[in-house]
């Protein structure tokens, strides 16, 4: 499993590089990486394990954040605006965003990142409210791969976009604004249920 010492920090040139597509079937090194990313998400969700391994918890981690320039990331978040509190726990390989909404949103408290140690308080990052994604997901228990497509809305969509940006060498810090600088049509995340359905448009 990856530890805090393994996390590549802001300022490293590798975080600004576009990652390579992963060859399938997975090599042993690539499988070790995706399993390590998955493990980090498991540990992040359990306070006792966070303390034991002394990691900084998060809801997503991408391969370039651990020094692997491949198009892989893991995410584990709950859609807190959904009545069912649906969980989105995926280990993605070669993901793509195939469609996105014109409507935009942002986390009112701003985003955070395992690779960014400085405070970005008071700044927010606009994201597409809804996205349609596809890619290969890795099953940790069976070690099998499966191609899937998903429609993500709200918080899970934000998490996916944040991690996907890492694969293109983009940090959220390059997309930050003060709220008053945003277009009035860009709404805070907690209001999306009042906005109606956000249609996605093909890329």
Image (cartoon, rainbow, N blue to C red):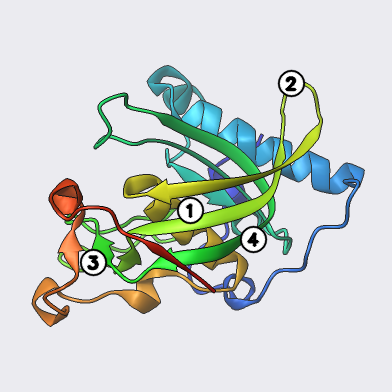
Residue at the spot 28% in from the left edge and 74% down from the top edge: 176
Residue linked to disc 3: 124
Q: Is residue 2 visible?
A: no
- For the C terminus, give its image quadrant: bottom right
| SS under mark 4 | helix
Report, in whole angstroms, how far the alpha carbon at label 2 lies from the one at label 3.
37 Å
Q: Is residue 33 visible?
A: yes
Q: In the drawing, does residue 6 fall left or right of residue 58?
A: right
Residue 160 disc label: 1
Measured as percent of width and height from the top left, residue 124 is found at 23, 66
Residue linked to disc 2: 141
Residue linked to disc 4: 64
Q: CB of mark 1 within 8 Å of CB of mark 4?
A: no
Upstream in sequence: badge 3 or badge 4? 4
Q: In the drawing, does residue 70 fall left or right of residue 64?
A: right
Q: CB of mark 3 within 8 Å of CB of mark 4?
A: no
């Amino acid at each position: 499993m990856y530890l805090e010492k393994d996390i590549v920090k802001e300022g490293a040139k590798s975080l600004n590089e576009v990652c390579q597509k992963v060859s399938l079937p997975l090599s042993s090194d690539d499988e070790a990486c995706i399993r390590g990313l998955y493990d980090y998400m498991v540990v992040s969700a359990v306070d006792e394990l966070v303390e034991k391994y002394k990691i900084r918890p998060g809801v997503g981690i991408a391969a370039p954040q651990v020094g692997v320039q491949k198009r892989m990331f893991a995410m584990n978040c709950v859609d807190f605006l959904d009545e069912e509190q649906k969980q989105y726990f995926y280990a993605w390989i070669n993901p793509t965003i195939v469609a996105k909404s014109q409507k935009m949103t942002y986390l009112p408290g701003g985003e955070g990142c395992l690779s960014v140690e400085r405070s970005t308080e008071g700044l927010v990052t606009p994201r597409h409210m809804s996205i349609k994604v596809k890619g290969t997901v890795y099953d940790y228990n069976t070690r099998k791969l499966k191609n899937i497509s998903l429609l993500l809305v709200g918080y899970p969509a934000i998490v996916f976009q944040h991690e996907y940006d890492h694969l293109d060498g983009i940090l959220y810090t390059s997309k930050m604004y003060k709220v008053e600088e945003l277009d009035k049509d860009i709404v805070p995340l907690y209001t999306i249920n009042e906005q109606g359905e956000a249609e996605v448009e093909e890329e």
